[in-house]
Image (tube, grey):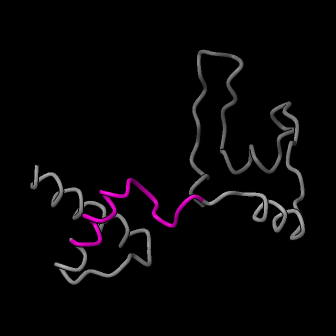
Amino acid sequence: MGNNHHIRRSSNSNVPFGRPEQMYRFPSLWSAENHIVAVTEIDMAACCRESEFRSVIPCDEDVYKVCVALMKEHNLSPAKTCVEATDLYLFMRREIVSML
């Protein structure tokens, strides 16, 4: 749904234009190759086993600690939706900037 917008024609003739969703699903219409490769559950499991997850903390450790403290202080819960995540991010950003 989000990739149904229209990419307009560019002055660069090598750059495709059209609707991303259609370009993805029907690459031959744009004289492009389909590079999609099917991945099995076994492949996915192998990737997970061979990947090194360094930390459960998704950012700088100090920033994470500040955000956790702010969430406790303001009685906030982790976001469950994109809208909640955006609101939480904007709140955290304002709070952190005001500390500087």
Please count the marks in the image. Answer: 0
Residue at the image point whose x is 74% and y is 43% from the top: 23
Which quadrant of the structure image shows residue 51?
bottom right
* Residue 24 vs residue 29, the one in the foreground: 24
Residue drawn at (37%, 77%), measured in percent from left and top?
A: 78
- Residue 45 lies, in percent from the top left, at 82, 68
Q: In the rendered image, which quarter is residue 2 located in?
A: bottom right
Is residue 31 part of the magenta span, yes or no?
Answer: no
| In this view, 35 is above or below 1 | above
Q: Quadrant of the N terminus?
A: bottom right
Give the magenta part as a residue range: 54-69
Of 76 and 29, nearer the camera is 76
- The spot of residue 36 in percent (x, y) is 85, 49
Q: Picture coordinates of residue 67 (x, y %)?
A: 27, 66
Residue 62 placement, left or right of 19 = left
Residue pictured at 30% horizontal, 65% vertical: 65
Can you say whether 40 is above or below 81 in the image?
A: above
Q: Is residue 63 magenta?
A: yes
For residue 42, side relative to residue 59 (left or right): right
Instruction: Name the one closer to the observer, 36 or 11.
Output: 36
Q: Quadrant of residue 12?
A: top right
Q: What x and y, as percent, mark residue 34?
A: 87, 42
